[in-house]
Amino acid sequence: MTMSQEKPNFKASKLLLLVHLLALLVIAHGKLPPEVSNDLNAPAFYILGDSSVDCGDNTLFYPLIHSSLSLYSCNGSDSTLIPHLLAEKMGMPNILPFYSQNGSIDGILKGLNFGSAQATIMNPSSQSYQSVNQQLRQVFDSMQLLQLQLSQETALHFIRSSIFYLSFGKDDYIDLYQRNASGAAKPNYSDQEFSQVLANQMIHVIRNLYDMNVRRMICMGILPLGCTPRMLLDRYNSNSKGGEEDDDGRGCVEEINAQVSEYNKMLHEQIAMLRTELPDAQIVFCDVYQGIRKIINNPEHYGFEDVKSACCGLGMYGAAIGCLSKDTACEQDTSHVWWDLYNPTKAVNSLLADSAWSGYPLSRICRPTTIQELLSTASPSHPIPT
């Protein structure tokens, strides 16, 4: 199954690329700038994803389209999110959002965040949201600009040595559950078929990046959405109207977690098969679902007190209204697992980033290697096509 073709609707992206192209015309070809001419195993870090990688800085008109979600979805800073915490460990802080570039080739060479809050794998239900297809086009155009600026050999080595981080799927499920709750039309898929479609599409994304000469990828699973404050509130409201209990005994909604867990399992298995098919690709799968479940199951061990309520939000579980002002946030966000309706606090993300990087304190978050081990491994080296 393939994604339907989308008509580009981000004119700003095309204008930005034109600015880049004009900038390239005044820069000499074939030479890597000194600031990236180094012996690092990963010269740049590129991020693709949804609200798990972007707080809204990379989403055009986000304050106008955040709808029922939070205006401050991650304490107002991308630096609280897992990929940016990992970038600091790699020695590559301040990864710029794609739409905030200044038009120079340096922006691309230092890495970019193509991710956009509420981006989806499937075609978005709202024209205001991005899809993974649009981010893939931005990556393709950016890599083409690199090849225009650098020699073929230098560009190919640079792309193959860089790390690409993928984190999608969360907003697909949020969109699905919101439509279910509102009575809107649902996809013509069973729960298992929906998960399979999403996993298949993510493998398609990885193949597309591989065809762009990307060889080193980190692919993230989806967190346990059934444990998020908004899902707990929806379950409570359903039960108060005579709905059936759907609690796993730890305060999470079992049905939702089962569907997300099925997606993660499918994606992990398909990535394992893909590594066999593409032996020169280094693809790491990171299971944030299991990591957060370990924290929720034993919160005191990891320093948390509240595993149900959002730090920033209003109403029961802090989930009736999202985080519209940081003035409504709790005093100690480090004691909370959840920042707002669907997003973890920086404290949780820091634990996940540490574990993804080194395998501690949450073991085997990433497989088959930690991200630190991925970086310590020499990047794939292949002859330049003639």
Image (cartoon, rainbow, N blue to C red):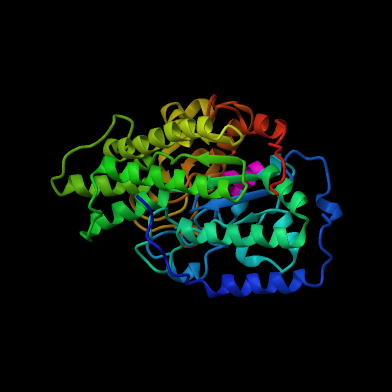
Which residue ends up furthest to the left in the rendered image? Answer: 242
Q: Nearer the viewer, residue 153 or 261?
A: 153
Residue 177, above or below 249: below
Residue under the image location 49 percent in, 53 percent down: 51
Give the overall secondary structure of the magenta segment.
Answer: helix
Q: Quadrant of residue 373?
A: top right
Q: Residue at x 44, y 38 (%)?
A: 306
Q: Is residue 355 visible?
A: yes
Q: Nearer the viewer, residue 93 or 127?
A: 127
Which residue sits at x=47%, y=56%? 132
Left or right: 91 as drawn, with respect to 181: right
Q: Is residue 304 left or right of residue 190?
A: right
Q: Quadrant of residue 363?
A: top right
- Most extreme residue toward the front, as rendered? 386
Task: Report x, y in % for residue 158.
Answer: 73, 48
In the rendered view, would you say 30 is above or below 26? Answer: above
The span shown in magenta is: 80-86
Q: How many marks?
A: 0
Residue 157: where, in percent of width, then height?
73, 45
Q: Is residue 59 magenta?
A: no
Name the residue rendered at 16%, 40% in the picture: 244
